[in-house]
Image (cartoon, helix red, strand yellow):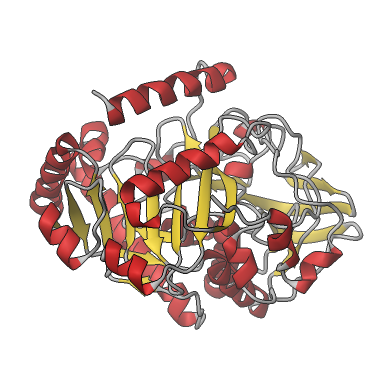
Amino acid sequence: MDIANNTQAELRQPAQAKTVLDRYDPSYDPLVAATPGRGQQYAPTYWVATAGTPPEDDGPVTADMDVDVVIIGSGFTGLSCAVFLAKEHGIKATVLEANQVSWGCTSRNGGQAQNASGRLSRSQWIQRWGLDTARRMHEEVREGFDTFRGLIRDGNIDCNPQDGGHLYIAHRDKAMRKLEAEAKVLREQFNYHTELLDKATLSRNYVNEAEAVGAMHEPDGIGVHPLKLAQGYHRMARELGATIHPSSPVLGWETRNGVHYLQTPGGVVRARAVGVATGGYTSQGLHQSLRSKIMPILSNSLVTRPMTDSEIAQCNFITNEVITDTRTLRYYYRKLPDNRLQIGSRSSITGADAHNPKHLQVLIDGMHRKFPALKGIKIDYSWWGWVDVSHDMMPRIAQPDEREQIFYALGYGGNGVMFSAHAGRRMAQRIAGIREGFELPIYNSPLPGHLFAPFRRLGQRMLYHWYHLRDEHL
């Protein structure tokens, strides 16, 4: 197996990345490191190599500043929040980013925009909250898709969209029965019509995925180039008056008399309100309200060389839609516009072990099982990134303490490409002082803690073994 050298990928990064202060640290771990670093290069992803020259930013903070609103984090959520603060509320935010703009999961994900948020199914929503709340949650997520599409349209963002829907592929007969039950719930309780596909129909009309026993096709799903999308948000935010400061990590945070004092290497930024949008890269020491509230999970991803016409034909890779399978430790994959295959799944437990080649091999083996015709195909890009998973598997866009002007939008659990746009809009509304319209559980409660949070890594190891046993053998 020919793995492209990451150093070569780094050389293909935009010219602006040459001015950074620090090299990319592939072992970064948010449960260990005090901050995500300062001015690090991007991870050597396919998205970075193909996004082109990034938009201009406002440079690092170089002196003390008094501003109205600070957004910490310049990924999808932070940038969309800055857009909506300016566009809908006349507030020009100051965005602080520890490294390069959109350096975290925004430039490392699979680019799958799905009709989801968090990791729970609609059936699980009903079990947790009841049917009425679940239906309102469903409508909120559908509205989120409209918000997402609207940003791309209004910003004229060329993010290589691949529209058409989402394929949820059953990797076992038992999983197919669960999809059939979920499709029934979606149709009867949410008036959301999906299509069940048997193996023959899936293989003939979409893709010949060797593990599949069938699939559920849902109408909402878009594949995007995530870094091009983020760069579009970036341009929109600055055109509307927001400022974006890379290489400006928050090293200290005090609140005195309602004013937030954010210490950066270049100076103190004083603000009346702060929105946190740091995703899986949220450091434990950033703020007390966030300690042990996120379980950061590593996800591996790779992109192959372009598939040949023969390889595409052998896989019958007709569809360009986004695809996931039914494993708990799911695989997500799709054919990119240049005919490469992108595929991702779980990775290491810790950052220190992330570079271990066995984790990449798990991903390669999964690709071979699904697409035997691609055995031996050259891997041009491979990387990993942290995903923000909340302890109850659902996001929060919340103000944890009504006495403080602190807000956050976190916990997407790997389903943030689409919903982060709406989460940014909702967080902007809260920062602007709107109090109505936040009755749903993801808005009216803070991120939950967990009694065994200090032992989360031990629990994660045990869960991964159990998930593998359940997904593959039981």
- Indicate the position of residue 160 as horizontal and vertical percent values: 46, 75
Residue at screen point 76% across, 34% down: 34
Direction from residue 336 to residue 68 in the image, left or right: right
Vertical placement of residue 247 versus 388, above or below: below
Camera-nearest residue between 355 and 445: 355
Direction from residue 94 to residue 331 in the image, left or right: left
- Indicate the position of residue 343 as horizontal and vertical percent values: 44, 53
Camera-nearest residue between 3 and 49: 3
- Indicate the position of residue 183 as horizontal and vertical percent values: 13, 49
Camera-nearest residue between 334 and 245: 334
Question: Which quadrant, please, contains the C terminus?
Answer: top left
Q: How many marks?
A: 0
Residue at screen point 61% across, 59% down: 45
Vertical placement of residue 201 versus 330, above or below: below
Residue at screen point 21% across, 32% down: 127
For residue 198, say whether it is visible: no
Direction from residue 126 to residue 327 in the image, left or right: right
Which image quadrant for residue 288?
A: top right
Which image quadrant for residue 282?
A: top right
- Indicate the position of residue 294 as horizontal and vertical percent values: 54, 34
Camera-nearest residue between 40 and 128: 40
Direction from residue 186 to residue 330 in the image, left or right: right
Residue at screen point 61% across, 72% down: 51
For residue 251, say whether it is visible: yes
Vertical placement of residue 303 versus 409, above or below: below
